Amino acid sequence: MEIMKKLFILIAMLVCSFACFAQSKMYVKNDGNSALSLRSEPKMFAKSKVKVAVGTEVNILETSADGKWVYVEVAARKNQKGWTQKNLLSQRKPSTKSSASAKELALAGKGFNSEVEALYAQSGNGNFDSVDLIESFSVDEDSVFIFLSDGKLKGGQ
């Protein structure tokens, strides 16, 4: 009987150890961007190491102390690893196709649907040239780091 107890405990310990070392499979979520940056540290403005597409399978290797960031590896390319926010991953593979047209996506980005835009156009307030101009601005990652450094700002903390 004593041997059975020891055997049972040994098997239980083995099962638990496998569960502890098992990698958690997740997918890059569609958050409106076409790709997700895997970063060098668990900070919003840490250097981007690699970009991965929406729907890409990743394995979680580590979780930050606060539980908000995870260190992942791309399942198909084990040499591609980095930190990302946990909320940008999903347990289910997201759809990479959109049923919305480019115009509908642009309207949604401005907070409008076609009916609201038509009402604004009728009232004479339908000119979004300034909004379109501001949305066309783009700042590369290196410029953001220079801005943060010159301003003595702590990026992403």
Image: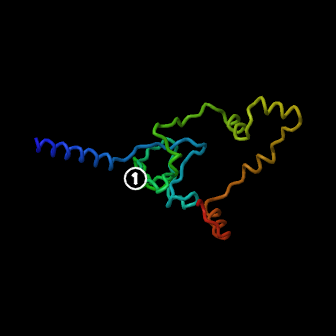
Above or below: residue 93 compared with residue 49: above
Q: In this figure, which colouring scheme has been used for the structure? A: rainbow
Query: Residue at left 75%, top 51%?
Result: 134
**In the image shown, does 145 or 42 lie closer to the viewer?**
42
Q: How many marks?
A: 1
Q: Secondary structure at mark 1?
A: strand
Would residue 3 be found to the left or right of residue 145 on screen? left
Would residue 23 be found to the left or right of residue 106 on screen? left
Quadrant including the N terminus: top left
**In the image shown, does 51 or 68 lie closer to the viewer?**
68
Name the spot of residue 79 as percent of width and height, x first: 40, 56
Would residue 27 be found to the left or right of residue 137 on screen? left
**In the current view of this chain or complex, which residue is farthest to the front?**
1
Name the spot of residue 31 as percent of width and height, x first: 58, 43
Q: Quadrant of residue 11?
A: top left
**In the image shown, does 19 or 98 lie closer to the viewer?**
19
**In the current view of this chain or complex, which residue is farthest to the top?**
115
Query: Residue at left 76%, top 46%?
Result: 132
Crowding at label 1, few (<14), some or many (≥20) Cα neighbours within 10 Å? some
Query: Residue at left 77%, top 29%?
Result: 115
Quadrant including the C terminus: bottom right
Q: Which residue is identified by label 1?
A: 61
Amino acid at dot 1 = Leu
Would residue 61 be found to the left or right of residue 68 on screen? left
Above or below: residue 85 compared with residue 92: below
Name the spot of residue 97 as percent of width and height, x first: 56, 34
